[in-house]
Structures are given as structure tokens and as C-alpha cells.
Image (spheres, rainbow, N blue to C red):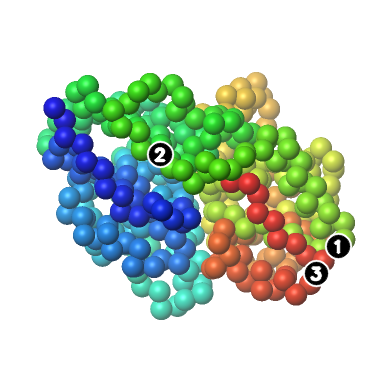
């Protein structure tokens, strides 16, 4: 009989999205995500520090701070020594996320020293990439355990993880989308039947998700309303995750209506975000893949989006304009700077798209 133990380290009974859990299957410790916030509060990671020696491998579900942001600190300071399993997009986008998070924080705090870019590179070297539905049999002490990533939706490369041994299967599913979107297909979670243990979140249980068309129309209407009164629009965003869906919606809308107001993606790694996505169409929705196969343009070759890396470049764009800037919390990065600058003018607006 397989012994299964699940210990929430953080990411429960909280409105904070960052999460980290320890799953033990017999004598093997599996760390499920290793998230942090852009405040980088070390106190949050105290439960992780206490069990770090139990971790034999790490499974990362999504390429954002909430799911992988603590990896550089865990390896550089806490002594985490374990392979990290991800999909290819989580590796590519995760690199952008971690580099941008470090640069955004050190821009505001020159004494920040919780991790360095060398620690980020150390993390990336431990990544082992898997494809969706690729079943991997662990070796050594993990003999008999199989891990498999499946499509979660929500973020490109985002995964639901299956961990199986003998007749037992554990499904780890956080931050998934039941509905297809422009960029990604819906999750495959409903294809699983009666796992031994289902680990999932409850943060959005009481939220009514709008239909995609209604969501898009509301976002467009709110943006245009601000632009027509001569104001700039600030949209807080992540660096390489949900921002792709928002950029796709806006770019297509600008093409359809032949709008001229500039759209800017502002963060230090902005050049790399669409470039990385352009090479990962097979991880996107079936419609995107088919359209590209029949000769339609790459959907991430945005025609109306300016890739901006600093505030001086942004100032050279005429107003009114739409600015997508990190971070989503507006506690750090260019988003914080712009909020302070734009807030005194009532004509400006700040919008947060549905996640």
C-alpha cells in the first residue's frame, strides 16, 4: 500500500496566489510549486525552509512568480538540491519572469540581495523539460513513481500534474481554465476520473467567470472610454503569462477598428515575451496552430504593440496610449512608477483584466 502525505507550506487559507506544498509518496518528497510574491518576504518561506531536506524533486505548474518565484532563493540560500520538472514554455517564459522580477526589484531597491541572476541561472540549469502527456518514470529512490504534465490552460505551458504509483494516482491542479481562450485551449482536468487524491484550489469558487466575448467587450469599452477623454490607460500585468491573452485581444481589436493610439508593453524583458511565444504555437490553442499552418501570420507578431524597456522610451510615444506594465500588484516595477505619475490626473485610468 502506498503511503501518501500532503503538507501545505503556504498558499492556503489566504487570498495570496503564491503557493508551495509538500507531497510525500512513500519516502519520496515532491515539492509542488515554489512560489513567492514580488514583495519577496522571507517570512513566507519559513515553512519551506523547515522541510527543504525532504525535497527530492520539484514540479512547477505555471511560469509566474506565484508558482516558481522562490526557486532562486530556495536554491541559493535554503540549499534546495533537486531536479525541477517543467514544460518547455514554463522554462522559456519562466526565464523571462525571473529575470524581469529581479531587475524590477533591484531598480527600486539597490540593496536587494536575496538572490542574484546567477541564482536564476542555477535554477534554469536544474530544469528538466517534459511535453504534455509525456509519462516519465522516476529512477533511483523514486522507482515506481510516474509523473506526467497535462494541459491546464490559464498560462502557456501551464500544467496539471499526475503523480502515480501502483494503483494510486494523485492529481495536482491549481490555476486552470475550464473555458478555451484566444491563446490557450481549456484544461483537460475533466478527463480524469476518481484519482486517489485531488489537490486543487478554491480561490475562484465563488467567482462567476464571464463569457470570453463579454470579458473582451468590457475590457475594450473601458479602454476606449479613457482614450476618448484623452487619458492614458495603465494595465498592470505579468511579464510573460496572462499578458499574452490581453495583448492578443487588444492587437486584434486595434486591427479591426484601425485604431492609432499606441499600445506599449513595458518591462525590462518586453522584447523577449512575444519572441518566445512566437516559437511555441504548438502549445497554444488548436485554432492558433491551424491558422499558422495554413499561412496566416504568427498571432504573437503584434502589429500595434510597442515593446518598451524604460520610461524614457515610453515618454516618446504620444498620448493617449495604453500601457501594460509590470507588476500586477503595482507594488514594484514600472507599474508602481506609472501609478504614482498618472493617478493625479482624473482623465487617466487603471484597469485590471479578468484573470
Residue 302 versus residue 342 in the image, above or below: above
Q: Earlier in the sequence, mark 3 or mark 1?
A: 1
Q: Marks 3 and 2: in contact by CB < 8 Å?
A: no
Label 2: how many residues lie within 10 Å, few (<14), some (14-19) or many (20+)?
few
Image position, residue 100 (x, y; %)? 49, 59
Front position among marks 3 and 1:
3
Which of the 4 image quarters holds residue 45?
bottom left
Which residue is tagged 2? 200
Image position, residue 317 (x, y; %)? 76, 62
Of residues 14 and 67, the one drawn nearer to the viewer in this rendering: 14
Residue 93 versus residue 168 in the image, above or below: below
Left/right of residue 277 with respect to residue 54 in the rendered view: right
Front position among marks 2 and 3:
2
Front position among marks 2 and 1:
2
Which of the 4 image quarters holds residue 76?
bottom left
Q: Earlier in the sequence, mark 2 or mark 1?
A: 2
In the rendered structure, find residue 346 and report the number of the disc placed on it.
Answer: 3
Distance Cα–Cα, label 2 vs label 3: 41 Å
Q: Secondary structure at mark 2?
A: strand
Q: Residue at x 75, y 75 (%)?
A: 344
Q: Residue at x 76, y 41 (%)?
A: 217
In the rendered structure, find residue 230 and report the number of the disc placed on it.
Answer: 1
Distance Cα–Cα, label 3 vs label 1: 10 Å
Distance Cα–Cα, label 2 vs label 1: 44 Å
Screen quadrant of the N terminus = top left
Amino acid at each position: 500500500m502506498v503511503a501518501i502525505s500532503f503538507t501545505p507550506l503556504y498558499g492556503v487559507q489566504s487570498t495570496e496566489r503564491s503557493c508551495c506544498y509538500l507531497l510525500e509518496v512513500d519516502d519520496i518528497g515532491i515539492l509542488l510549486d515554489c512560489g513567492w510574491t514580488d514583495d519577496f518576504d522571507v517570512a513566507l518561506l519559513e515553512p519551506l525552509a523547515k522541510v527543504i531536506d525532504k525535497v527530492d524533486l520539484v514540479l512547477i505548474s505555471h511560469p509566474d512568480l506565484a508558482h516558481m518565484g522562490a526557486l532562486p532563493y530556495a536554491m541559493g540560500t535554503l540549499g534546495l538540491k533537486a531536479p525541477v520538472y517543467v514544460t518547455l514554455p514554463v522554462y522559456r517564459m519562466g526565464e523571462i519572469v525571473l529575470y524581469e522580477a529581479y531587475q524590477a526589484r533591484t531598480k527600486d531597491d539597490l540593496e536587494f540581495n536575496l538572490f542574484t541572476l546567477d541564482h536564476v541561472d542555477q535554477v534554469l540549469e536544474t530544469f528538466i523539460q517534459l511535453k504534455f502527456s509525456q509519462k516519465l518514470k522516476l529512477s533511483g529512490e523514486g522507482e515506481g513513481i510516474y509523473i506526467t504534465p497535462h494541459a491546464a490552460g490559464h498560462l502557456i505551458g501551464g500544467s496539471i500534474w499526475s503523480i502515480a504509483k501502483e494503483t494510486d494516482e494523485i492529481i495536482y491542479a491549481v490555476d486552470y481554465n475550464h473555458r478555451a481562450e484566444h491563446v490557450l485551449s481549456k484544461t483537460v482536468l475533466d478527463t480524469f476520473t476518481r484519482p486517489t487524491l485531488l489537490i486543487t484550489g478554491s480561490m475562484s469558487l465563488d467567482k462567476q467567470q464571464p463569457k470570453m466575448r463579454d470579458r473582451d467587450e468590457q475590457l475594450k469599452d473601458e479602454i476606449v472610454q479613457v482614450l476618448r477623454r484623452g487619458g492614458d490607460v495603465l494595465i498592470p500585468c505579468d511579464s510573460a503569462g496572462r499578458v499574452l491573452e490581453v495583448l492578443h485581444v487588444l492587437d486584434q481589436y486595434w486591427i479591426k477598428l484601425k485604431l492609432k493610439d499606441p499600445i506599449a508593453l513595458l518591462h525590462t524583458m518586453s522584447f523577449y515575451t512575444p519572441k518566445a511565444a512566437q516559437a511555441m504555437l504548438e502549445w497554444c490553442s488548436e485554432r492558433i496552430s491551424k491558422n499558422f499552418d495554413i499561412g496566416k501570420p504568427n498571432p504573437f507578431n503584434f502589429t500595434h504593440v510597442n515593446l518598451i524597456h524604460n520610461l524614457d522610451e515610453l515618454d516618446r510615444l504620444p498620448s493617449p496610449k495604453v500601457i501594460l506594465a509590470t507588476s500586477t500588484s503595482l507594488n514594484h516595477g514600472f507599474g508602481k512608477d506609472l501609478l504614482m505619475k498618472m493617478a493625479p490626473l482624473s482623465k487617466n485610468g487603471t484597469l485590471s483584466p479578468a484573470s
